[in-house]
Image (cartoon, helix red, strand yellow):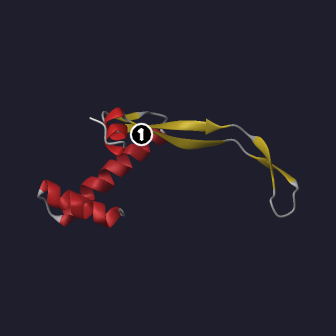
Amino acid sequence: MNKSELVECIMNDADISKASAERVLNSAIELITKAVTKGETVQLIGFGTYSQGKRSARMGRNPSTGAEIKIAASKTVKFAAGKAFKDAVNKRK
C-alpha cells in the first residue's frame, strides 16, 4: 500500500473527502516527524512507538577499494510495534 492508497482507505473508512483525508494523513506524519526530531517519543497504544536513536561513529570499508573510511555518528528513527499490532500480524487473539 502506498500513500495515495492509504488516503483512499482513510477517505472511505472515515466517510470524508479525499482532500480532507490527505490533510489528516499529512498532518499526522508531520507531527510525528517534528516530535521525533525534537527527541520526543510518540506512543500510539496498540500500534507502536516512534523514537529517536543514535548511531556511534565507527570505521567502515569502501566495498570497491577496501580502504577504511570513518563513518560519522548519526541519529536514526526507531519504531517498535505495539502488542496489538504484533498480534494482528501473527493472527493471535
Q: Is residue 22 above or below residue 35?
A: below
Left or right of residue 38: residue 66: right
Q: Quadrant of the C terminus?
A: top left
- Is 14 left or right of 60, judged from the image as shown? left
Quadrant assignment, res 10: bottom left
Find the residue positioned furthest to the left: 15
Where residue 80 appears, as percent x and y from the top left, is 45, 37
Residue at x 56%, y 36% (from the top left corner): 53
The residue drawn where x is 15% and y is 63% is: 17
Q: Amino acid at mark 1?
A: Ala
Q: Nearer the viewer, residue 37 or 7?
A: 7
Q: Residues within 10 Å of mark 1 (few under 14, many from 20)?
A: some
Residue at 35% of width from left, 62% of height from top?
A: 1
Question: Is residue 31 rendered to the left or right of residue 52?
Answer: left
**19 or 46, which is in the foreground?**
46
Depth order, front residue of 79/56: 79
The residue that appears at 57% across and 43% down in the rendered structure is 76
- Residue 64 locus on image (x, y percent): 82, 64
Quadrant of the rendered image containing residue 86: top left
Horizontal side of 72 relative to 14 (left or right) equals right
Per the image, the residue denoted by label 1 is 35
